[in-house]
Image (cartoon, grey):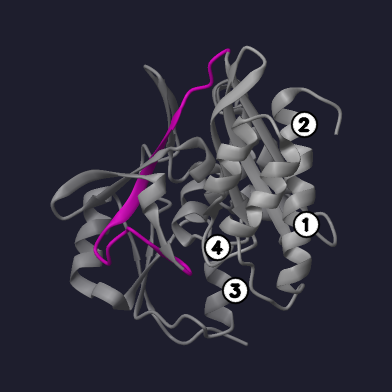
């Protein structure tokens, strides 16, 4: 299929993009990497009146350590992030997830900001953003504002970004010596959407884990924090944490697998990721 007709505008600045969004409202779509948008356009699941191309905007492709935060511009490509020493050192969870995203052609064009703003519940980076407790910088007609990851995802493909706003930067707490990270997913083939996945962070406190954040993907309408399991895992009993998932997750059936299978996989992933966090053998 071919997309429905639409107008095209190339934004020269964030302010220019926001102005165009304000003018066209719900009839506008933003183009960054386009790895999700092109598919929905061609299938006519999305029929915007105008496509606003962000790729000419300077300054949105930077990765900057600022104090205790790592600021990642919305236009940073997956491939560029995978090669970044700053990402590897200060955001190792992102580095762990990037090789699982699609295939090289997708990673060469897809953007960090585009993935998080699109908020596909089966995608890796939204879950990592949630697990890290990051902040999204969102810019609109009234300037920039920040939204915590816990408040960012509202529903299926729905976020805190307003119709006349755009995601410009994500900010992640930079890694410290006492932080631990874990990531795993299960898919039919490498590069496919995950049947289920888990991104996790924790703080090592002696022999125990504290400040645990478990963010699942592929098991709900948004990335899901398993808060009951987090508390159980902090007590040191992995099997109690696996049992606690029944209170946190209610995966729906989808075209890939049943909810019951996804629930089983969630437990498998928790055991694997817990081993990564503790340094034990899986």
Callout 1: 10 Å neighbours few (<14), some, many (20+)? some
Q: Position of residue 9 (x, y in %)?
A: 33, 66
Element under disc 1? helix
Q: Residues within 10 Å of mark 2 (few under 14, many from 20)?
A: some
Residue range highlighted in magenta: 156-177
Q: Nearer the viewer, residue 236 or 185?
A: 236
Which residue lies under the disc numbered 4?
120
Q: CA distance from mark 3 to mark 4?
A: 13 Å
Q: Nearer the viewer, mark 2 or mark 3?
A: 2
Asked if the magenta segment contains residue 166, the reply would be yes
> Residue placed farthest to the left in the image?
142
Q: CA distance from mark 1 to mark 2?
A: 16 Å
Residue 52 visible within the image: yes
Mark 2–mark 4 Cα distance, whole angstroms, equals 27 Å
CA–CA distance in space, label 1 to label 3: 28 Å
Residue at image mark 1: 265
Callout 4 secondary element: loop
């Amino acid at each position: 299929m071919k997309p429905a007709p639409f107008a095209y505008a190339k934004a020269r600045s964030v302010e220019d993009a926001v102005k165009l969004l304000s003018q066209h409202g719900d009839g506008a779509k933003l183009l960054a990497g386009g790895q999700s948008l092109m598919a929905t356009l061609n299938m006519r699941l999305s029929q915007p009146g105008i496509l606003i191309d962000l790729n000419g905007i300077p300054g949105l492709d930077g990765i900057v350590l600022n104090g205790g935060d790592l600021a990642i511009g919305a236009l940073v490509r997956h491939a560029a992030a995978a090669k970044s020493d700053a990402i590897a050192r200060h955001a190792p969870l992102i580095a762990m997830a990037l090789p699982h995203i699609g295939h090289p052609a997708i990673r060469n064009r897809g953007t960090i900001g585009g993935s998080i703003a699109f908020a596909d519940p089966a995608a890796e980076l939204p879950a990592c953003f949630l697990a890290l407790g990051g902040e999204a910088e969102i810019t609109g007609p009234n300037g920039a504002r920040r939204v915590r990851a816990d408040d960012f995802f509202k529903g299926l493909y729905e976020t805190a970004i307003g119709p006349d706003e755009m995601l410009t930067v994500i900010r992640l707490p930079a890694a410290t010596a006492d932080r631990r990270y874990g990531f795993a997913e299960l898919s039919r083939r490498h590069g496919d959407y995950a049947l289920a996945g888990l991104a996790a962070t924790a703080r090592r406190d002696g022999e125990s884990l504290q400040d645990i954040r478990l963010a699942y993907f592929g098991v709900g309408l948004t990335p899901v924090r398993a808060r009951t399991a987090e508390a159980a895992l902090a007590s040191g009993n992995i099997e109690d944490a696996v049992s606690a998932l029944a209170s946190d997750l209610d995966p729906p059936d989808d075209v890939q697998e049943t909810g019951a299978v996804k629930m089983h996989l969630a437990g498998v992933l928790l055991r694997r990721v817990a081993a990564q966090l503790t340094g034990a053998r899986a």
